[in-house]
Amino acid sequence: MAVCSGPRGECRGGRILFILFLVFLLPAGLRAEEAAVGRDGTLVFQSPDGSSAVLDILPRGTRLELVKRGEEWSEVMLPESNTRGFVRTSALQLSAMAAAQEGKALLSGPASPLYNTLQEELNKSDAKIRRIEQAVSHLEGMVDKYTQADSAMHGKRGAKGKALRSQEFPEAGGSWAGYRGFDLFSGMYTKEKDLTIGGAVSWFPESMSGFGLELEAGYLFLEGDRRGAGLSLDLLYPLGWSRPWLMPYLCAGGGLFYLSGVDGAGSETNPSANLGAGALCPLSSGFSLRPDLRLFASFNDGERNIDGRFFLALHRGF
């Protein structure tokens, strides 16, 4: 029997039945269909793909608004966040009446241990992700600072290195004007296998259009008690097809050649001339190896003595 109350004799039970009647008469598209989660630990994914991001983990009995139902995946609206996600259709109780009948009882009890464990692990993962993001952001800041500092230092080192190279070695094929060098060499005359050591200084004046002058002095170790020494002034000409690791040149010059112990006791000083070629092979910090091969001639009372000479020098450029 319906219970009636109110001044106009309104019937409370009749009103309830009337409202329910109107609700069930509404088109299905105008009613929000509900679903209840059927098992603990149900995962809500960002897209209908088990490898996509997990938005939430729901306990059994959670009531959801069903946006679109599919055979394998259903799109739902998460409670209290108005965020859409996807759950497996098999994990839902899709009957609205069943959700209405079981929802309160299911939601009234505490969450299961499985749900609590999964939720705790999710929270830990979120915390770890946040810490990793902070660490990565910190590292990116450090890398940016290091890159800026390194760029500044590299620019200074590059400018300084370029200045040093301009003082030590000309650029490949560049001008040698103003270049100076010093050599310590050891070599051999090829005819009699006589050893020689010595030194040389070189200079490329700006007024000589790429040619350089070299003053060379050497000492010879001859057989027996004989000794020899040579002094020459040479003209150097660097070739234009030089490379950073090889700077070839041509050379020619003349000077004096001294011999002692000639014919047992005497000594003599004769004019000399040389013609040849060599190269600078840069190492580092202004140092290079200098191989040099020349045709050497000395003149004594109209007689000409021709010999070959090869030396290897340690060259220092300035």
Image (cartoon, rainbow, N blue to C red):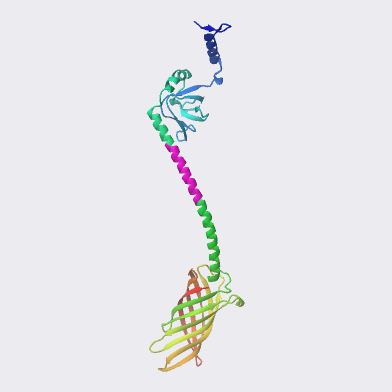
Q: Residue at x 39, y 27 (%)?
A: 112
Q: Does residue 88 sit above or below 191 in this rendering?
A: above
Task: Check residue 211 for magenta coloring.
Answer: no
User: Quick check: can you spot residue 91?
Assistant: yes
Seen from the viewer's position, the closer of residues 158 and 124 is 124
Asked if residue 284 lies left or right of residue 223, the reply is: right
Residue plotted at (38% across, 29% down): 114
Residue at coordinates 44% horizontally, 40% vertically from top-left? 128
Residue 180 placement (x, y as % from top left): 54, 75
Tell me which residue sits at (40%, 30%) in the image: 116
223 is higher (above) or lower (below) than 284: below
**Which sits in the foreground, 37 or 299?**
37
Pinpoint residue 264: horizontal percent, then vertical percent. 40, 94
| Span of residues in magenta | 124-142
Along the horizontal axis of the image, is 9 left or right of 105?
right
Is residue 77 depicted above or below 140 in this figure?
above
The answer to whether 38 appears left or right of 214 in the picture is left
Outermost residue toward the front in this view: 7
Q: Which SS type dominates the magenta stretch?
A: helix
